[in-house]
Amino acid sequence: MTREEALALLRQYNQEEFHVRHAITVGRVMRRMAQELGRADEADFWECVGILHDIDFERWPEQHCKKCVELLREAGADERLIHAVTCHGYGVCSDVKPEDEMEKVLFACDELTGLIGACAPVRPSGSITDMELSSLKKKYKSKSFAAGCSREIIARGAEMLGWTLDELLLRTLEAMKPDEAAINEEVAALSA
């Protein structure tokens, strides 16, 4: 599946700007993580998984990580992509456990991208591009900030990967910074 096909499939089931932005953000983070972790040959696939990870959430939140199987199979997605998408909700809405590195990265970064994204509007610059790890850690520790982003899942993701929490926070933040403007432009174009 190409990136364009993944975006078209995402848009078929997701109209809200928030969900589209999150999907594109996670996709871009997954691409950067693949490159950083020596899996550049799979960067396209990792990005498609990130784009499609919440394909069922907007319309079927009560069937999240379940309805996606049907939607992705109908679209001709391969079983590896389907497994990756279903396991990102492990322990919350799915019994499918992340097995390989890509699946663990998705599990770890999904919630964290939401937390980091929530930081931009409250920063003086209005952006995460100048954000330091210390600022992110303060927001992470503040349970009332972006309360919907589970710190427990983020911590479990770091553990799954064998990374420290600081390492996960920093890697994800650094993966998001270069694409912030491009994501904003792409979301605006898709929403027009």
Image (tube, rainbow, N blue to C red):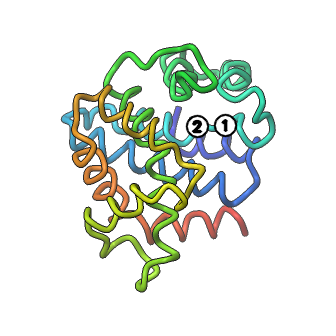
Q: Position of residue 74 (x, y in %)?
A: 72, 21
Q: Position of residue 111 (x, y in %)?
A: 49, 44
Left or right: 133 in relation to 2: left
Q: CA distance from mark 2 to mark 1?
A: 5 Å
Residue at horizontal 52 percent and vertical 62 percent from the top? 145
Q: Position of residue 186 (x, y in %)?
A: 56, 64
Q: Quadrant of residue 71?
A: top right
Q: Work out which residue is located at the far right of the displayed protein and give it.
A: 59
Residue at horizontal 65 percent and vertical 25 percent from the top? 65
Residue at horizontal 66 percent and vertical 58 percent from the top? 18
Pick the residue in front: 56 or 95: 95
The kind of secondary structure element at disc 2 is helix
Say what amino acid the circle numbered 1 marks. Answer: Ile
182 versus 141 height, above or below: below
Left or right: 74 in relation to 174: right
Pick the residue in front: 45 or 32: 32
Residue at horizontal 24 percent and vertical 49 percent from the top? 166
Left or right: 149 in relation to 60: left
Q: Quadrant of residue 60?
A: top right
Residues at badges 2 and 1 in contact (C-beta under 8 Å)? Answer: yes
Screen quadrant of the C terminus: bottom right
Q: Work out which residue is located at the far left of the displayed protein and give it.
A: 38
Q: Quadrant of residue 59?
A: top right
- Label at residue 30: none
The residue carrying mark 1 is 55
Say what amino acid the circle numbered 2 marks. Answer: Leu
Pick the residue in front: 88 or 164: 164
The kind of secondary structure element at disc 1 is loop
146 versus 151 height, above or below: below
Left or right: 44 in relation to 33: right
The residue carrying mark 2 is 52
